[in-house]
Image: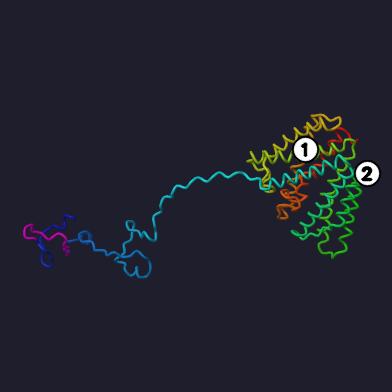
Amino acid sequence: MSHSSWGAPPTAGQTGYWGPTEGGPVQGAAPAGPAYDAPEAQQTRPMPIVPDVPAHGGDQDDDRGAARLSGPLFRNETQNPEPMPDAPQPAPAPQKKSAGRDLSAAIGVGVGLGVVIIASLFVVKAVFVGVIAVAVVVGLWELTSRLRERKDIGAPLVPLAVGGAAMVAAGYVRGAEGAWVAMALTALAVLVWRMTEPPEGYLKDVTAGVFAAFYVPFLATFVAMMLTADDGSWRVLTFLLLTVVSDTGAYAVGWRFGKNKLAPRISPGKTREGLLGAVLFAMVAGALCMQFLIDDGRWWQGLLLGLAVAASATLGDLGESMIKRDLGIKDMGTLLPGHGGIMDRLDSLLPTAPVVWLLLVLFVGSA
């Protein structure tokens, strides 16, 4: 209460109560008149009694403006609750890395394929050529089926399958010359076969057909050409071992230590650490294979061979991943549980075959 509220007695026109002993107005009265400024009068005016009003919204509350207080000191606790501090949450349990596939099925299928390959490779070479031809035909079927389903591209399967099997046999019997001739005839057969259908889409269909003929059977022909040497079975085994070891090293090291992506736009799962693991594993395996399995081979040649295999296998895997990403699929097929399709297993092998064939010819000859 300001001191001015206890001033001189009221003059004419003023009202007030004077106590019997203090000689001044009763505390709490609100004198009015020119002798008192409005701010001071407001300071001495008693606060109105505010009734308890339920704090709920709506038009009814808006009509009671005198009964609702607002401002920084009065907040609607129901509509705008003060944030409460978050209760401490238990730390999430660390997640274990997952291989992303059924490893037991993948291992079982891999062992079964290995038994078939080894048995046919060292019993009768012609049987192994038949295994290559079957893999080529199935791979062509998977590739052309996905092209038709996802891109509406009708690469003709019949001339590709017949020409692909003939290409593998020609490579085994006549070498590189036979493989090139069979490749040219297969491409010509694709062009002619597609003429039996309407011309719409002819160019894209035959282009895809020629690509498929080169990508699957022609590259696989180099495996058959390796087999023609005196130690051909061991050359093919070296080729298979190095490719598998490279893939295994990339997977094991990348899964355990991989942090830096190798090609995230193509294959997000591949890392630079995985590539280093592929190189190290393949070089060690190459040195051992060239020293102990290949006639007249040297360990240092195996180091170079392993390095080349790691590079070609990685590029082949990335190339297949690019195709599948363009098609919008994860696997080319479902024939091999835990692996996908045949093409999902040939992705590293196909581009590696001509690399291994060429280096072995340069290192120890073709005989």
Query: Which dot marks residue 242?
Result: 1
Q: Nearer the viewer, residue 108 or 265?
A: 108
- Residue 171 locus on image (x, y percent): 90, 45
Q: Magenta part of the protein: which range?
A: 19-33
- Residue 91 locus on image (x, y percent): 50, 45
Q: Most prominent secondary structure in the magenta stretch? A: loop
Circles 1 and 2: CB atoms closer than 8 Å: no
The quadrant of the rendering that contains the C terminus is top right
Query: Which dot marks residue 342?
Result: none
Q: Nearer the viewer, residue 196 or 297?
A: 297
- Relative to 4, residue 262 above or below: above
- Relative to 345, residue 44 above or below: below
Query: Which dot marks residue 174?
Result: 2
Q: Quadrant of residue 150?
A: bottom right
> Is 196 one of the magenta-colored residues?
no
- Residue 352 locus on image (x, y percent): 80, 42
Name the residue: 88% across, 58% down: 191
Q: From the image, state whether disc 1 or disc 2 is nearer to you.
A: 1
Name the amino acid type tagged 2.
Answer: Arg
Badge 2: residue crowd in 10 Å (few <14, some 14–19, many ≥20)? some
At mark 1, the secondary structure is: helix
Q: Quadrant of residue 276?
A: top right
Q: Residue furthest left?
A: 21
Would residue 126 be found to the left or right of residue 50 on screen? right
